[in-house]
Image (cartoon, rainbow, N blue to C red):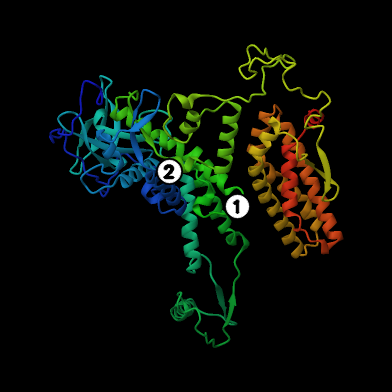
Amino acid sequence: MKIFGVRVPFTSSSPERRSTAPIPDDRWMSSTPYVYLGGETPITPETALRFSAVFGCVRVISQTLAALPLLMYERQADGGKNRATKHPLYTLLRTKPNRFKTSGLEFREQLTAHALLHGNGYAQIIKNGRDEPLELIPMHPSRVRPDVTKDEQMIYRVAMKGGGERILPADDVFHIRAFRDSGLEGVSPIAMAEKIVRSGLSLESFGMNFFEGGAFPAGVLEYPGEMSAEAKTNLAESWHKLYGGENRGKKAAVLEAGLKWSPMGIPQSDAQFLEQRKFQVTEICRIYGVPPHLLADLDRATFSNIEEQNQNFVDYCLMPWFKRWEEAIVRDFLDGDDSKYFAEFLADGLLRGNTAARTSSYAMGRQWGWFSINDIRSRENLNPIGPEGDVYLSPMNMVPAGEEGQQPDPAQDPESDGKSEEESPKIAKNSKTPAENREKETVLGGETSIKQPKNEPKSDDNRLNDAFRGAFRETWQRVIRKEIGAVKKAARAKNSDFDAWMDEFVVDQQCFASECLGELARTLYVLRGLDSSLVLPELMDHYRASIRDRVDAWRADPASGYDHHEDELASYWTERMLNYSVSEYEHAA
């Protein structure tokens, strides 16, 4: 059956006759016949939400996805797309899924949270007499079970409030699945991680009891003589009555008859429960694919890697959920046919990443001929500008391999105006190449940077350098600032083992610089035909060695200041990477 095909034309004046009565969300019902996770203490998806890490992961994923507009598009003949605002699903999915004052954001958030907790999210599709979807009514996953009839037709069994069940055909159910190993249902992450969730809840309970005084005695009352059992009980009860509880801890205690209070320390094994709780948070983040910094665990988050972690969250956590929703809409509403209409999350802001690196990549792709204007606009989720946007450019001084020594035929060259070789301006045979004209200047402890003569015409390499220079310089400034800040902080701390700290720091700083500069360097060197896996490690080794040289020079002459050369260092290493020569590459290879 094709719901949105030619055979079923949709109009705005469809009758309001509904296919089936809506099944209300009966989450409040106590029995859950289709959900059992086992264990002595029942761990259900609902009780798992009491664990802050589970709640945080479910909240971050479901709210981020729900906050993005979910739009219906119509494909265009030129390969573009337009918003299908007149399509029945446009309003249904985006703003008003049903008549129960549920917003589009709340509907997407609820079904995604159901799938994250139970492995499945269900909504009943209410249709009119023309088979058009009118409403989407969420159904709690604990009340729904997919099944297959004897004639191999898929159905959904829905447990009802008064007992029994109602059978819904597959065409009347919108179904979002989580990870699926077999069968008709998705796998509940809570069921798979039941022991981890139970452990996390136990640690939270232990922490509460510990600080309330129930997990470990704060101290003991010592009596020099012997006491009867009744006297011990009376003394303990009266002591707790006078000084127990969180509001009585500062009252002065008066001890008689030789009584002595001896406080007890916290055992090391009990004091480490905070580390155990952090580990449980990491375990839950690993299950859901959420970076820990989104749950306020910033132990391993830095200003340098936070953007990369956010991009990884979009690529490896949110993107699969986008595809689950988009493909489920095509399957359940469009009969699996997306040739004309399709649904898509408007995730431009999340997917763009670093603006400077992205625009530099577009500029290079446009200049070197593997991107057209329409290609770039497509990547930016913009419509094409027409056939003129499909033109690919190529540099005028580039020729096919093997034709380097051939001269163009003046009769066939439209730019020669019919002039012969003798009439054309000649190029001096003894003129030097840009590489031969490069000058070196000594900066910062004997290192060399490359400087181009002022009047030298720009080569292709120089144009590439101009395109990359801004992004490289900005990145190197960030790297150098981190280096200077770390070294000065360690020096202020007056660490007795500064050399050992330096041994570890230079390695970490080299890894940090490689991580920040990796994508830019790989793009640049690929355009020049160089293998970045050889070039980048060599340059980073030089950078690591230079850190030690600068620190040693600074320690020998503290008055020189370690942060006086920040701009020069950023400029030097920028030019060093931009002007990496072929001879250096051949030596490294």
In the rendered image, residue 583, in percent from the top left (x then y), is placed at 81, 29
Tell me: residue 196, above or below residue 391: below
Query: Can you say which quadrant of the picture contains the C terminus?
Result: top right
Disc 2 marks a residue whose amino acid type is Ile
Tell me: residue 589, above or below residue 549: above
Which of discs 2 and 1 lies nearer the camera? The answer is 1
Q: Secondary structure at mark 1?
A: loop
Q: Secondary structure at mark 2?
A: helix
Marks 2 and 1 sit apart, C-alpha to C-alpha, by 32 Å
Left or right: where 477 falls relative to 61: right
In the rendered image, residue 159, in percent from the top left (x then y), is placed at 23, 39
Q: State the residue at coordinates (73%, 47%).
A: 571
Q: Nearer the viewer, residue 502 or 346?
A: 346
Quadrant in which residue 68 is drawn: top left
Q: Determine which residue is flagged by label 2.
A: 190
Left or right: where 19 falls relative to 234: left
Q: State the residue at coordinates (49%, 69%).
A: 213
In the rendered image, residue 150, in percent from the top left (x then y), is placed at 26, 21
Query: Can you say which quadrant of the picture contains the N terminus?
Result: top left
Q: Nearer the viewer, residue 249 or 294?
A: 294
Can residue 493 be spotted in the picture? no
Q: Quick one: label 2 or label 1, which is nearer the N terminus?
A: 2
Q: Determine which residue is flagged by label 1.
A: 303
Disc 1 marks a residue whose amino acid type is Phe
Tell me: residue 487, above or below residue 190: below
